[in-house]
Image (cartoon, helix red, strand yellow):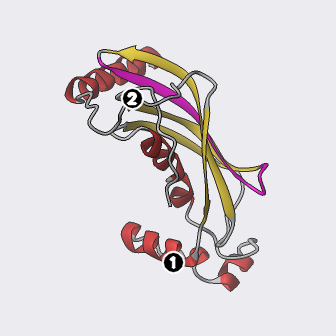
Amino acid sequence: MLLMNGIMMRMVYNRIASNFHSSKMFCSKVEPTLKVGDILQQRRIFTIEDVVEYSNVSKDINPLHFDTKCAQIAGFQDRLVHGMLVASLFPRIISSHFPGAVYVSQNLQFRQPVYVEDEIVGEVQAFSIINFKKNYFVKFITRCFKKDSLIVLDGEATAILPYLSWQSQIVE
């Protein structure tokens, strides 16, 4: 079964890579070059406006996200930020450094609650880089922290990057 899943994933990668053109129009030659072990981070404070906007798009209207009393009855301190909204930091980090990247997969483990107005640090760390045709398959360890060290979310992601030179830019 694992072999079959591996073959199927390779077929998906091959199809995506063959349709993915390695366009350099987004990026001039910049340094540094992504290497195994490199970490990219971004900070974000999730507001109630973020939660409302996400709820409008996702149609997730769970009262745990909007009603403090309901959240407290469920055992939380306050209103929760949607876990998938927090996880959206990962593709944001990757695409802000590698415009044109294609997000292929993500697995997640939700470890701790994230509350409205929590400051979260999202990070991706490259742990595998494979050159394939004119692109790069990069596997990342993904983590989100609050209070700079408490892991609230972790997992792994795979992305197809058109190049390994990354752009250092701040995304608001």
Dominant SS of magenta comes to: strand
Q: In the rendering, at what x and y percent does residue 48 appear? A: 56, 77
Is residue 104 positioned above or below 54 on the image? Answer: above
Q: Given the image, on which type of amino acid does mark 1 rest? A: Glu
At 24% from the left and 30% from the top, the residue drawn is 20
Where disc 1 sits, the SS reads helix
At 79% from the left and 49% from the top, the residue drawn is 149
Q: Does the magenta portion include 150?
A: no
Q: In the rendering, at what x and y percent does residue 99 appear? A: 37, 41
| Residue 29 circle label | 2
Is residue 110 positioned above or below 70 on the image? Answer: above
Q: In the rendering, at what x and y percent does residue 121 appear? A: 66, 52
For the residue carrying disc 1, how many other residues have a C-alpha within 10 Å: few (<14), some (14-19), or many (20+)?
few
At 65% from the left and 76% from the top, the residue drawn is 79
Q: In the picture provided, is 26 more to the left or to the right than 137? A: left
- Mark 2 vs 1, N-terminal side: 2
Q: In the picture provided, is 43 more to the left or to the right than 133? A: right
Q: Give the quadrant of residue 22.
A: top left
- Kindly report the distance in space between the C-alpha atoms of the residues bearing marks 2 and 1: 37 Å
* Boundaries of the magenta span: 134-149
Q: Given the image, on which type of amino acid does mark 2 rest? A: Lys
Q: Give the quadrant of residue 134.
A: top left
Q: Residue furthest left?
A: 19
Asked whether 26 or 162 is in front, the reply is 26
Q: Which residue has dot 1 on it?
A: 49
Asked whether 126 or 11 is in front, the reply is 126
Quarter of the picture holding the N terminus: top left
